[in-house]
Amino acid sequence: MRAVTWLLLLSLAGCATSGVSTVGGTSGVRIGGANEDGTGFVDWHSATVSPTIVMGPQGGQHVWVSLRTDRDFYASKMRITIAMTDLDTGEVVKPGEIPFTRTLVDDGQELQVSGITAYIKEPCKIKGHHVRVHADVEDLVGLTGSDEAVITPTWSGYCTP
């Protein structure tokens, strides 16, 4: 019986060092944009960033968001929430917080997901404004992280004067 107990404890200790979180906590997250087609990662922390508000195929508008995280996260079915605030007016960018469930891809150094659509109901209200984009992530074992960046989105669509 003692041998079985020791084997069980040793196997659990091995899991704790495997790079996958076994209990809640926090870890690193970086928010950024994506290429025009929703792929890749564009660093939103390097300089003033002016992503284009994209017209979706179903008539909605969005900016592409990508995330990179430490490999401590369990990549499958991560809960991601994106929220935007217009810093020039203090208003939440409608439709407000947007929850997603995504599986991140391991590139050998980080986990990444591209092509998250951060929806924008009224692009004319925020074009040219300073907008804070905030992301919260939580994996299936309770590890959490967050990041935010300020962007100045552009919009080439029609706005009523």
Image: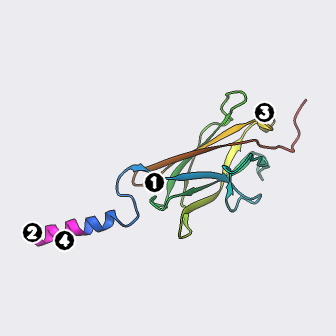
Q: Gap between marks 1 and 4, in whole Å?
A: 28 Å
Q: Is residue 6 magenta?
A: yes
Q: Is residue 122 left or right of residue 1?
A: right
Other-residue count near label 4 (Cα within 10 Å), few / some / many at <14 / 14–19 / ≥20: few
Q: Is residue 26 above or below residue 123?
A: below
Instruction: Return the x and y of residue 135 as percentages of the image width and height.
Output: 57, 45
- The residue beneath circle 1 is 139
Residue, disc 2: 2
Of callouts 1 and 4, the N-terminal one:
4
The answer to whether residue 2 is magenta is yes
- Magenta highlight range: 1-10
What amino acid is labelled 1 in the image?
Asp
Residue found 58% across the figure and 57% down from its top? 68
User: Which residue is situated farthest in the left direction here?
Assistant: 1
Question: Which one is in front, 80 or 48?
Answer: 48
- The amino acid sitting under disc 4 is Leu
Per the image, label 1 sits on a secondary structure element best described as loop
> Could you tell me if the residues under marks 3 and 2 are in contact, i.e. CB atoms within 8 Å?
no
Residue 125: which disc? 3
- In the rendered image, is residue 136 in sight? no
**Circle 2 Cα neighbour tier, 10 Å, few/some/many (<14 / 14–19 / ≥20):** few
Q: Label 3 neighbourhood size at 10 Å, few (<14), some (14-19), many (20+)?
A: some
Give residue 7's mark.
Answer: 4
Q: Amino acid at mark 2?
A: Arg
Give the x, y percent position of residue 6.
16, 68
* Mark 3 in CB contact with mark 1 (< 8 angstroms): no
- Closer to the chain start, of discs 3 and 2, is 2
Residue 36 place in picture, x, y as percent: 77, 58
Distance Cα–Cα, label 4 vs label 2: 9 Å
